[in-house]
């Protein structure tokens, strides 16, 4: 014990303090639920969340696919490791994907509070896409998001959009939406032709589905130069919701703007 104890000890000490704090802390959404400010009448809706979990989210621009979330040591300093971030659970693998899950949780929480008929589905994608949860309640969707396990791999946006669209086709709600949460990387399996993402988006939009791209790059925001134009072209409104700022107050403003855009489109 210390010979000079603090005169103002913490009232909530950590039970297991980290000995090596992460160099890339997660910037979490500050509210568990946001409220729409638009005055439009709400209508029943179904929303598919297409969540990217490719290698580019966690590989620190090394090009590694990060399949299975290994911790690859780049130097003698454990803080310079990738794909696995120090202090982040194996399910989330890195702080960037942990943030993606928290952002998805906030959006579903906020939409779930609305007094209208609604359903959500979750599609995860990397080299290919698969349905993690079909059209379900708010509670079931939140549970699904919490249990998402990072996969690593390439970025097959076309398959993500098509898989979402197939699931939404069973909904009786007229308003159908796809929220594509991605870092925008365009590396796809060789079997997927160039332009497939835009073709898949055009097909979905022609059927009345609204697409909202949400951009969450892995590190510095200056990497979005080539990604934003593609995401803008597949967006129903041409708008891309860019979550590249680590400043929490700016992030909250983006969250509110996204929610209003979803509800008032």
Image (cartoon, grey):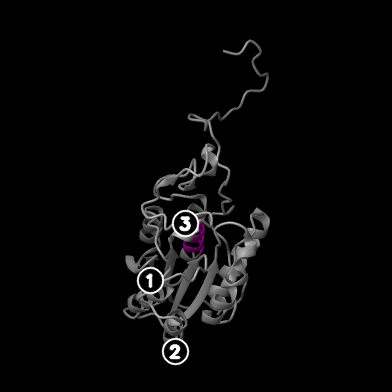
Q: For the residue carrying disc 3, how many other residues have a C-alpha within 10 Å: few (<14), some (14-19), or many (20+)?
A: many
Magenta includes 109? Answer: yes
Please identify, in this view, whether the residue under mark 1 or under mark 2 is nearer the observer: 1
- The label shown at residue 206 is 2
Horizontal placement of 206 versus 140: left or right?
A: right
Quadrant in the rendering for residue 80: top right
Instruction: Please tell me whether residue 13 is drawn above or below residue 248 in the rendered image.
Output: above
Residue 251 rendering spot, x and y as whole percentages: 63, 59
Q: Earlier in the sequence, mark 3 or mark 2?
A: 3
Please identify, in this view, whether the residue under mark 3 or under mark 1 is nearer the observer: 1
Is residue 134 visible to us here? no
Is residue 7 visible to us here? yes
Which segment is the magenta one?
100-110
Horizontal placement of 246 versus 145: left or right?
A: right
Residue that appears at 58% across and 43% down: 23
Q: Which residue is mark 3?
A: 101
Pointer 1 with pointer 2, Cβ within 8 A: no
Q: Which residue is mark 1?
A: 189
Q: Earlier in the sequence, mark 1 or mark 2?
A: 1
């Amino acid at each position: 014990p210390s010979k000079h104890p603090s005169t103002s000890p913490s009232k909530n000490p950590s039970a297991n303090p980290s000995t090596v704090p992460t160099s890339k802390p997660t910037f979490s959404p500050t509210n568990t639920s946001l409220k729409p400010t638009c005055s439009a009448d709400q209508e029943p809706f179904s929303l598919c969340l297409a969540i990217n979990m490719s290698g580019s989210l966690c590989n620190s621009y090394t090009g590694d696919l990060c399949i299975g979330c290994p911790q690859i040591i780049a130097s003698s300093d454990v803080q310079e490791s990738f794909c696995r971030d120090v202090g982040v659970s194996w399910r989330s693998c890195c702080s960037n994907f942990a943030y993606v899950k928290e952002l998805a949780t906030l959006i579903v929480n906020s939409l779930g509070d609305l007094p209208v008929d609604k359903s959500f589905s979750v599609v995860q994608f990397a080299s290919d896409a698969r349905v993690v949860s079909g059209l379900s309640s708010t509670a079931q969707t939140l549970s699904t998001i919490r249990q998402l396990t990072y996969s690593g791999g390439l970025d097959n946006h076309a398959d993500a959009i098509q898989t979402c669209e197939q699931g939404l086709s069973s909904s009786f709600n007229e308003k159908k939406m796809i929220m594509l949460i991605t870092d925008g990387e365009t590396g796809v399996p060789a079997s997927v032709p160039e332009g497939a993402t835009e073709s898949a988006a055009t097909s979905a939009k022609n059927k009345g589905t609204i697409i909202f791209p949400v951009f969450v790059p892995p590190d510095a925001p200056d990497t979005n130069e080539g990604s934003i134009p593609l995401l803008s072209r597949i967006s129903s409104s041409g708008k891309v919701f860019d979550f590249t700022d680590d400043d929490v107050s700016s992030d909250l403003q983006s969250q509110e703007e996204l929610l209003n855009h979803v509800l008032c489109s």
